[in-house]
Image (cartoon, rainbow, N blue to C red):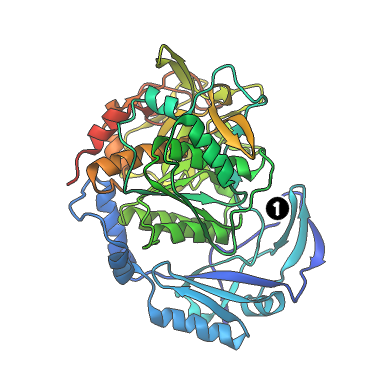
């Protein structure tokens, strides 16, 4: 059978990884195969009009999107025949998400995709890995765009920072933060917020105690959805992924308690991350209008196929009127990479509302000062900079990235972040995790904060705002402009900058900018 290399599927071992030998041939796994989209050019045109500020087409329902832009059943049948010929089983098929999930063992997947799966060990743990590209039969050329899940290395990290002490000199409840930022009144009734989590879990008793302590009654509705075998599995470690899960739920639930919160738990792999986002975006039962993501990794840590797949998932969400808020990272302009400036993905997708970090001080119930979050002593800094992957979106034309050492560079590629909010652990959020009251910061807090704000606005409008980036960039006056500080190589400046984007929200002004329902 004649085969070809799947473009963008090349993998290298993780830095410092050691090969321990062949993976167990009998090990069972599932692999997500992503199919091409029908009428891709039409979708690109539709979203390009949204990016240019033309909302005359409106948003598509999930059903209409699936009909026009989902995968073709004939393509899924081709994959099924290929799978059967290698003894692989079709575990599930979703044409709206363009995903066929195959199940079998390592030996059969090795043969089907021309790979050699290995047991790898690296400083962060062990994983099943591969090196090089995936091979596909020529009959599937152009039909299959990505094959995800053969390699189960951790793909992303949570972007939260826990304060070293149970309390910080200056900390806030999420309700106090919302008050300082002038969030509009309301509870978000009738709305649904999706939260993506790649590990950890929540304890219902902790949530009940936390919300009761804030006077939030009744407590928000929280539902867990399993994706690719992920589950609500608290580790009992407040410094682990439980911290991310509880932070996200408690920020959204405190600010928009009338909204239902649905938490999509998936494995921390490229397949799990992408499947969680597509499951949330296309969820016709819960119908989230906002997705909050506080996980990510440097652009350079993604394969081209997985990066494209997740970017396309966010594009689809935009077309269906779903806003995706993404934390921009907690490692400043370098994003934790040893050399050069880097930005975090998926925050760098032009279809994400990238959320950066500030340090917020208050006095007498109002903002006293707000600067770029940057703790030079090792507490982290807000991620931001210029993408090496994504083209300059229309709504960022003419902007410049101010440099710490002076001068500014005109943006030639997508700039990150778009917006900001309090992220400094020293001025962080009072949160409850695994029975412990603590203070959390990081841009992980900013994504759910913005998700909650947009949920309040959606409830007031009666219809989702959807792809907000073009509108927000046209209304710079809706923000507290942050003009002091830096995140490493980039400096704050008047207007947009690569530390805090347009700035932190003036909630009522953001609501006015997004306007009433059309």
Q: Kindly identify which residue carries mark 1.
A: 14
From the viewer's perspective, tell me whether residue 130 is left or right of residue 510. Answer: right
Q: Residue at x 34, y 48 (%)?
A: 191
Q: Residue at x 50, y 42 (%)?
A: 249
Residue 70 location, x and y as percent?
36, 69
From the viewer's perspective, tell me whether residue 502 is left or right of residue 116. Answer: left
Quadrant of the frame with the N terminus: bottom right
Taking depth in this image into account, of 142 and 478 the one nearest to the observer is: 478
Taking depth in this image into account, of 316 and 48 the one nearest to the observer is: 316
Q: Residues within 10 Å of mark 1 (few under 14, many from 20)?
A: some
Residue 27 location, x and y as percent?
73, 72
**Vertical placement of residue 421 versus 203, above or below:** above
**Vertical placement of residue 302 versus 25, above or below:** above
**From where the camera sits, is residue 37 visible?**
yes
Q: Residue at x 24, y 52 (%)?
A: 49
Element marked by disc 1: loop
**From where the camera sits, is residue 416 visible?**
no
From the viewer's perspective, tell me whether residue 241 is left or right of residue 49. Answer: right
- The quadrant in which residue 24 appears is bottom right
């Amino acid at each position: 059978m004649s085969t070809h290399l799947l473009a963008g599927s090349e993998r290298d071992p993780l830095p410092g990884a050691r090969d321990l030998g062949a993976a167990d041939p009998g090990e069972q796994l599932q692999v997500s195969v992503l199919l091409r989209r029908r009428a891709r050019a039409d979708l690109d045109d539709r979203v390009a009009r949204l990016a240019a500020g033309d909302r005359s087409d409106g948003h598509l329902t999930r059903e209409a999107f699936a009909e026009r832009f989902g995968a073709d059943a004939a393509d899924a049948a081709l994959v099924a025949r290929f799978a059967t010929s290698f003894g692989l089983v079709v575990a599930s098929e979703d044409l709206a998400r363009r995903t066929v999930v195959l199940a079998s063992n390592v030996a059969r997947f090795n043969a089907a995709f021309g790979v050699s799966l290995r047991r790898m060990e690296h400083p962060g743990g062990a994983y099943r890995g591969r090196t090089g590209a995936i091979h596909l039969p020529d009959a599937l050329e152009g039909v299959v765009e990505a094959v995800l899940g053969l390699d189960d290395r951790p793909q992303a990290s949570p972007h939260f920072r826990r304060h070293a002490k149970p309390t910080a000199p200056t900390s806030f409840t999420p309700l106090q933060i919302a008050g300082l930022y002038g969030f509009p009144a309301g509870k978000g009734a009738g709305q649904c917020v999706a939260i993506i989590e790649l590990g950890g879990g929540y304890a219902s008793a902790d949530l009940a105690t936390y919300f009761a302590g804030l006077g939030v009654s009744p407590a928000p509705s929280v539902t867990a959805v399993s994706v690719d075998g992920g589950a609500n599995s608290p580790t009992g470690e407040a410094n682990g992924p439980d911290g991310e899960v509880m932070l996200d739920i408690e920020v959204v639930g405190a600010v928009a308690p009338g909204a239902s919160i649905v938490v999509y738990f998936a494995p921390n792999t490229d397949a799990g991350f992408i499947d969680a986002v597509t499951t949330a975006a296309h969820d016709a039962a819960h119908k989230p209008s906002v997705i909050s993501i506080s996980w990510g990794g440097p652009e350079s840590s993604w394969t081209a196929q997985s990066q494209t797949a997740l970017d396309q998932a966010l594009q689809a969400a935009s077309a269906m009127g779903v806003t995706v808020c993404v934390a921009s990272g907690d490692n400043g302009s370098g994003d934790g990479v040893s050399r050069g400036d880097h930005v975090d993905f998926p925050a760098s997708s032009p279809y994400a509302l990238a959320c950066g970090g500030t340090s917020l001080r208050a006095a007498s119930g109002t903002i006293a000062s707000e600067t770029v979050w940057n703790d030079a002593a090792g507490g982290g800094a807000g991620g931001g900079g210029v993408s090496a992957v994504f083209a300059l979106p229309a709504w960022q034309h003419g902007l410049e990235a101010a440099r710490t050492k002076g001068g500014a560079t005109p943006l030639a590629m997508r700039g990150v972040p778009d917006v900001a909010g309090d992220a400094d652990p020293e001025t962080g959020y009072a949160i409850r995790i695994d029975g412990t009251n603590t203070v959390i910061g990081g841009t992980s807090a900013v994504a759910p904060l913005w998700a909650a704000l947009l949920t309040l606005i959606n409830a007031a409008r009666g219809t989702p705002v959807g792809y907000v980036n073009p509108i927000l960039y046209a209304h710079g006056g809706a923000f507290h402009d942050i003009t002091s500080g830096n995140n490493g190589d980039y400096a704050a400046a008047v207007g947009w900058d690569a530390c805090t984007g347009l700035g932190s929200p003036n909630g009522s002004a953001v609501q006015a900018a997004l306007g009433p329902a059309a």
